Structure formats: C-alpha cells, structure tokens
C-alpha cells in the first residue's frame, strides 16, 4: 500500500482517471445546479441542469410558484425527482461558486 501514497490516481481502493475525479469524489449537493425548491409546507431538493440557460447563476433556493411559471408542471416534477443530494455527481457536474469567486467576476 505504501506505493500508492503519492499516486494522484489512487483514491482509496479505486484507480480514478483525472478527468473523472470530480464526478466520482463529489456528491450532487456540491453541484452548481442543485437547489432547494421551497413549497408552502416543505422544501425539496432539485436539479436544474437541463434548464441552466434560464439563469446565469442558479439560486440556492427558489419558490415553487416561480419555478412552476418558468418551466411548467411536467418539468417541475422532473427537477424535483432528479435532486438527490446524496447521489454521486452526474456527467454535467460543476462546482458551486464560492463567495470569493462571485465577487471577483
């Protein structure tokens, strides 16, 4: 095991290629397109990756009525069904911007 200590491709018990490391190491909740949809009584996670053209930077939380007006009922159900915060990151993963990165741009 000592051989793998300095190897960047070795992660635990798997060998990971550099271009796939972010997708394997991160969860869906770390993605820029993961947001919380606020309803009247509950808050559900959602993924707006398909609708990323609607925002320059997607918000952290969004009211359900606003999202319903923007994308429609079928798309709203799709957004809420895809938002599992504990799932591994998908192919379109992008890190959330930190406060420092937002101020620089």
Image (cartoon, rainbow, N blue to C red):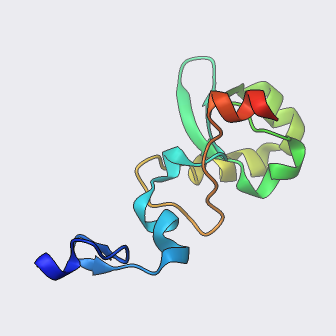
72 horizontally vs 102: left or right = right
Q: Which residue is found at the position 50% from the left and 63% from the top?
A: 22
Q: Which residue is found at the position 74% from the left and 31% from the top?
A: 102
Q: Is residue 19 above or below residue 95?
A: below
Q: Nearer the viewer, residue 28 or 74?
A: 28
Q: Nearer the viewer, residue 44 or 58?
A: 58
Residue 49 image position (x, y, % from top left):
72, 54
Q: Is residue 71 above or below residue 3?
A: above
Q: Which residue is found at the position 78% from the left and 44% from the top?
A: 73
Residue 30 image position (x, y, % from top left):
52, 46
Residue 95 image position (x, y, % from top left):
60, 49
Furthest residue toward top = 40
Question: How many marks can you see?
Answer: 0
Q: Nearer the viewer, residue 96 or 86?
A: 96
Task: State which quarter of the image contains the C terminus.
Answer: top right
Any part of residue 60 in sight: no
- Dividing the picture into quarters, in which one does residue 15 lie? bottom left
Any part of residue 85 in sight: yes
Residue 78 image position (x, y, % from top left):
67, 53
Q: Which residue is found at the position 62% from the left and 34% from the top?
A: 98
Task: State which quarter of the image contains the N terminus.
Answer: bottom left
68 horizontally vs 7: left or right = right
């Amino acid at each position: 095991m000592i051989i793998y200590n300095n190897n960047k491709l070795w992660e635990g018990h798997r060998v990971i290629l550099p271009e796939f490391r972010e997708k394997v190491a991160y969860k869906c909740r770390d993605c820029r397109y993961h947001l919380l949809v606020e309803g009247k009584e509950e808050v559900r996670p959602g993924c707006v990756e398909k609708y990323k053209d609607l925002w320059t930077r997607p918000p952290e939380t969004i009211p359900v009525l606003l999202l319903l007006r923007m994308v429609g009922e079928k798309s709203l159900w799709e957004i809420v069904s895809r938002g599992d915060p504990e799932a591994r990151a998908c192919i379109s993963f992008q890190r959330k911007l930190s406060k420092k990165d937002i101020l620089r741009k």
